[in-house]
């Protein structure tokens, strides 16, 4: 983050996703972007979406990693059905951003 000049706006938390969500909740912190890269098991992904959805600002972005893994894909496909604010198109950014990040990481590692 420091090398990219983002250390004043991006705060990586090396905690379990539920512990980090608890900190955000207790301090009434709302995120512009929440990027989830945690347990890829279906139940864990559903839990993370449920924990982080209320912590993202109304116009913010909730996204995650490993979009195509079975547990992640199933959870993101099911979540909108229980949320009036989301639809399956909202998750298209999840896979697009993941692909872009992975492409950039591959390019950097080949230098």
Image: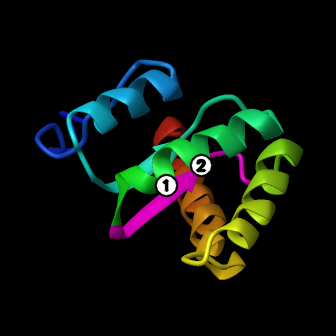
Q: Pointer 1 and pointer 2: residues touching (CB < 8 Å)?
A: yes
Q: Which quarter of the image is occupied by the N terminus?
A: top left
60 with respect to 8 (left or right): right
8 with respect to 74 (left or right): left
Q: Where is residue 73 in the image (x, y as percent from the top left)?
A: 80, 55
What kind of element bears circle 1?
helix
104 with respect to 9 (left or right): right
Label drawn at residue 53: 1
Task: Pick whichever, 22 or 10, lies toward us.
Answer: 22
Is residue 10 shown above or below 83? above
79 with respect to 60 (left or right): right
Q: Looking at the magenta stretch, what is its main secondary structure?
A: strand
Is residue 74 shown above or below 69? below
Residue 24 seen in this snapshot: yes
Q: Where is residue 100 in the image (x, y as percent from the top left)?
A: 55, 61
Place residue 21 in its image quadrant: top left
Instruction: Tell me where the magenta segment starts and ends, as one range.
Output: 58-67
The residue shown at (71%, 33%) is: 44
> Pointer 1: residues within 10 angstroms few (<14), some, or many (20+)?
some
The residue shown at (77%, 47%) is: 72
Q: Position of residue 43 (x, y in %)?
A: 78, 36
Q: Name the residue under label 2.
A: 49
Q: Does the magenta stretch include residue 46?
A: no
The residue shown at (52%, 42%) is: 51
Disc tally is 2
Place residue 63 in its image quadrant: bottom right
Q: Where is residue 103 in the image (x, y as percent from the top left)?
A: 58, 55
Is residue 2 shown above or below 15? below
């Amino acid at each position: 983050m420091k090398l990219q000049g983002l250390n004043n706006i991006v705060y990586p938390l090396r905690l379990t996703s539920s512990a980090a969500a608890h900190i955000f909740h207790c301090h009434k912190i709302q995120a512009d972007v929440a990027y989830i890269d945690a347990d890829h098991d279906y139940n864990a992904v559903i839990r993370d979406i449920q924990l982080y959805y209320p912590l993202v600002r109304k116009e913010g972005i909730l996204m995650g990693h490993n979009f195509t893994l079975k547990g992640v894909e199933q959870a993101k496909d099911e979540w909108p059905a229980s949320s009036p604010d989301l639809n399956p198109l909202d998750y298209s950014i999840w896979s697009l951003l993941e692909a872009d990040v992975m492409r950039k990481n591959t390019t950097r590692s080949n230098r």
